[in-house]
Image (cartoon, grey):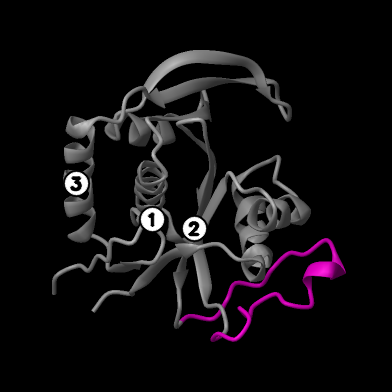
Amino acid sequence: MSDEYLLRPMTIDDIGQVITIERLSFSMPWSPLTYFYEIQQNRSAYMAVIELPDAPPIPPIMESSRFQIFPFRRRNQKPVGRLTAYGGMWVKHGEAHISTIAAHPDYRGQRLGELMLYGLIQRGIECEADHVMLEVRISNTVAQNLYHKYGFEKTGIRPMYYHDNNEDAYVMAVPTIDADYRRKLDTYLTALQQKVFFQDHFTGQNSFKEE
């Protein structure tokens, strides 16, 4: 049997591992305090992780001792396992804006980024979003190809959006979430079910790969 992943909401106890993945993925990582705000205070934010519950956690990179008091344990629950991917979005006024998404380098190529993308879109639909948008580096063709697969179209450019090298960003969007798009999303889920063995505690749609 393949590893069983768990797609679930992000908690403050995940911040250490999330920051580790963040720093391995991006040159301009968010701070621990930013994630704390998104999880605890931003009512428009929906943050998620993909966990391997039975695997040991990856060593966290922490900047503030404020977060070291609970790096791996969810309160009144079993210890957090290994986080392999994470993502987040804001939903407001009918728009689902995907803010961040990444997979740990050791787990790339296993469709976990796609699973996270699906989960965020589906959660946005459940929150009554009528469209989805995001920004992506113009040089990141791998991510762009995945977004195209999920119906995102290039709708604009944000000049010098990334401050580390002043690279432009494409604005990409699913302009309308209608019945036809939801049917296509169901086909993407069916394909994922054949490739990834996971439980879904984020969108409410449990999914298992067949043996």
C-alpha distance separating marks 3 and 2: 22 Å
> Percent from the top left, x then y, of residue 15?
67, 63
| Residue in view at x 85 percent, y 63 percent | 64
Specify the quadrant that holds the C terminus: bottom left
Marks 2 and 1 close (CB-CB < 8 Å): yes
| Residue in view at x 54 percent, y 81 percent | 56
C-alpha distance separating marks 1 and 3: 17 Å
Specify the quadrant that holds the N terminus: bottom left
- SS label for mark 2: strand
Q: Is residue 207 magenta?
A: no
Q: Which mark is residue 112?
A: 1
Q: Amino acid at mark 2?
A: Ala
According to the picture, the residue beneath numbered tag 3 turns out to be 186
According to the picture, the residue beneath numbered tag 2 turns out to be 85
Please say if 127 is above or below 205.
Answer: above
In the rendered structure, which segment of residues is drawn in magenta?
55-78
Taking depth in this image into account, of 185 and 143 the one nearest to the observer is: 185
Nearest-to-viewer mark from 1 and 3 = 3
Q: Amino acid at mark 3?
A: Asp
Q: Amino acid at mark 1?
A: Leu
> Percent from the top left, x then y, of residue 100?
56, 43
Q: Residues within 10 Å of mark 3 (few under 14, many from 20)?
A: few
